[in-house]
Image: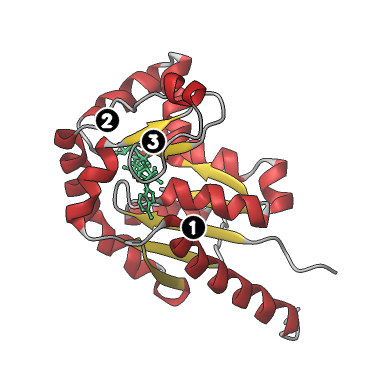
Amino acid sequence: PPPPPLKIMISGAPASGKGTQCQLITQKYNLVHISAGDLLRAEIVSGSENGRRAKECMERGQLVPDEIVVMMVKDRLSQTDSEQNGWLLDGYPRSSSQATALMGFGFHPDLFIVLEVPEDILVERVVGRRLDPVTGKIYHLKYSPPETEEIAARLTQRFDDTEEKVKLRLKTHNQNVSDVLSMYDDITIKIKGNCPKEEVFTQIDTALSEMLQQRNTAPSSH
Ligand code: AP5
């Protein structure tokens, strides 16, 4: 029988490049990209009470309460496409309680990718970020400028992408990161994220290819 599909988590500070790398990883490995932040932004757009509460927390750069986030992520992970193709979970878990919940539901990732980027470059990445509402592609005015005038004219900015707000998001990240890392010690790979996005991807791609090769050659334990 074919090996089970890949299950990967990716973490890193705000604007460390998680979304950018997820776009590159899913292109090659065909995994379902599940971003906790994107799920929350969709909830805001839906106009629900949960969306309204989530937005209040996100504007302060704080974690959205578990009672909103945990089931939202669990439901997306349980959908057929995620089960069949494998998944790439982005921005979850962000606390030990979220990690514990994930394990409790029976989700056990194969690999935890941690992007390491020095804090002083994160603000520049955030304020220059732009999004294409048509394709979902992530741009940066300096590092990944739009390909055409037409795309440039329709780019949007996220409501929490200001220097002031990214500092709050970073503070929340720094308060929680060690709790989460300590729970996945045995499957963690640390990636240097302070280089062009193609070079960051090469590091990740190498680790993923090695892991897949090992899985395919190792005698099955069941
Ligand atoms: P979320 O949407 O996850 O935001 P974040 O963690 O702050 O991360 P970002 O999306 O800002 O950045 P990224 O790492 O994806 O970087 P990107 O690739 O875009 O969460 C938002 C909020 O939702 C949180 O603050 C919280 O309130 C809430 N939330 C989310 N998950 C939650 C959870 N589990 N529990 C509770 N609350 C939760 O890159 C950034 C920019 O840099 C882009 O312009 C890009 O083009 C550029 N760039 C990328 N890579 C490079 C490179 N190598 N070199 C140069 N530029 C680069």
Q: Mark 1 sits on what residue?
A: 9
* Sequence-earlier tag: 3 or 1: 1
Residue 162: x %, y % from top left: 21, 32
Residue 186 located left or right of residue 171: right
Residue 87: x and y, percent?
A: 61, 52
Callout 3: SS: helix
| Cα separation between marks 3 and 1 | 21 Å
Beta carbon of the mark 2 residue lies under 8 A of ligand 1: yes
Mark 3 lies on residue: 67
- Choose top left, top right, bottom left or bottom right for residue 130: top left
Which image quarter: residue 199? bottom left
Instruction: Give amino acid for label 3.
Output: Glu
Q: Give the mark nearest the N terminus, 2 or 3.
A: 3
Secondary element under disc 2, as helix, strand or loop, is loop
Residue pictured at 54% horizontal, 73% vertical:
207
Alpha carbons under labels 2 and 1: distance apart:
23 Å
Q: Quadrant of the C terminus?
A: bottom right
State the residue position of label 2: 160
Residue closest to the far right? 1
Closer mark to the observer between disc 2 and disc 3: 2
Q: Kindly identify the amino acid type of the residue bearing the numbered disc 1.
A: Met
Answer whether labels 3 and 1 touch (C-beta < 8 Å): no
Seen from the viewer's position, the closer of residues 45 and 163 is: 163
Q: Nearer the viewer, mark 2 or mark 1?
A: 2
Q: Please say whether residue 92 is visible from this viewpoint.
A: no
In the current view of this chain or complex, which residue is farthest to the top?
A: 47
Q: Quadrant of the N terminus?
A: bottom right
Q: Is residue 125 left or right of residue 211?
A: left
